Amino acid sequence: MGLWQIDTDVLARSRFVLSPFAETFASLKLLHAGTGAHPGETAWLRTHLPGYRARLAADPVAALIVRAALGTSWIADFFCPTSCVGESFEDTVTRVRTTAPAQARANLRVSLRGPLPAALDQADDLPDRATALLTYVWDETVRPYWARRRRVLEADMVARTARVNQGGWAAVLDSPPRSNRLARGDPHRPGTTRWLGESRFQVNPNAYPLREVAAGADLLFMPVTPRTSWVSWEGRERYAVVYPCLGALTEARRPAPAGLGALLGTARAALLLLLGTPMSTTQLVAVTGQGLGSVGRHLRVLLDAGLVERRRAGQSVLYERTSAGEVLVGAAGAEPEAGTGATP
């Protein structure tokens, strides 16, 4: 199996970060697959898949780049650089554009596991074409939604940080329901990422040599809203684990059970279901679409009833179900939303 041996100091300094480029690349993968994992993805594909396919039809070489770069078990290195902390989409994609054409071709041969089609083997503008396609995906399919997606991603990072504090890294890194295209693109298989203890992290089921993530390296965890994932690294200095957000944040809202809605009101019941994951008012507004004033009033009622509690995490105030809230949700027959798709 593919294993990372992570230095304890590296793990202690690791952090969750936002990456507009990772979100864009995950969206490109979703467009390439053409099939959504839940109704929200399906609706997004209905809106953007025709334009994406038309874009590829107008540039057949770009279409070949995508197919070759995503490969069968490895994502071409130049096509998916590892984002830095605080890096904009434009900053990351600049590294795609400045790749030497010969290096881009070499990366594509690795991901394709064989010779390139003639159109790719003879082209000297592969980095430019790849950059243009990634920029199209960002401009047309991600940036219009980025403000809301950013808040959803922030909500996930807060929830994961709380899990680290409560249950250690095993509570965050294990992934029994679904897994990643890891080691730059391992085929999607269930349960291939897990924390093994003794600073060992399984990243895929393949027989790759043990990779040491040594002292001084950066280890970054990057959530994305599409249901896809991978790992990447640059040299021995920077490693990233890209993982799908908690399903409770990205999927279409399930209606509250009728009994719970009748007892609390539909809007308050929906908030109570969401608060199996710690969230701020801003994040609840982003996820539910309710106004800030409405969310605040509903939270006050739930607080007074002892169904939720609040605590400070840095500069944010987070709300979460109490044990009484858990009992009420369980008695109503509502599955806690925080457990849906909770995988990195």
Image: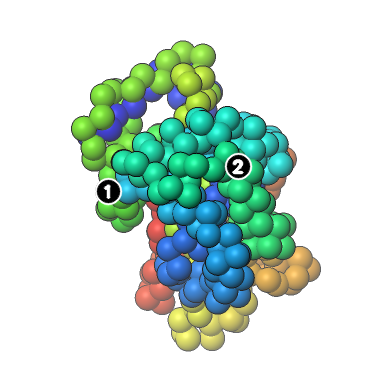
Q: Which amino acid does label 2 sit on?
A: Asp
* Residue 259: % across, % down: 46, 84
Q: Is residue 8 above or below residue 127?
A: above
* Residue 236: % across, % down: 46, 19
Q: Which of 185 and 275 is in front in this view?
A: 185
Question: Which residue is drawn at the image coordinates 75% and 70% (left, top)?
Answer: 291
Q: In which quarter of the image is residue 115?
A: top left
Q: Nearer the viewer, residue 71 or 333?
A: 71
Image quarter (top left, top right, bottom left or bottom right) of the N terminus: top left
Question: Does the image show residue 195?
Answer: no
Residue named by callout 1: 191
Question: Which residue is drawn at the image coordinates 41% and 73% (left, top)?
Answer: 334
* Residue furthest out toward the right: 293
Tell me: 190 left or right of 277: left
Q: Which amino acid does label 1 sit on?
A: Gly
Circle nearer the viewer, 2 or 1: 2
* Residue 67: % across, % down: 43, 54
Tell me: 251 left or right of 213: right
Residue named by callout 2: 125
- The circle drawn on residue 322 is none
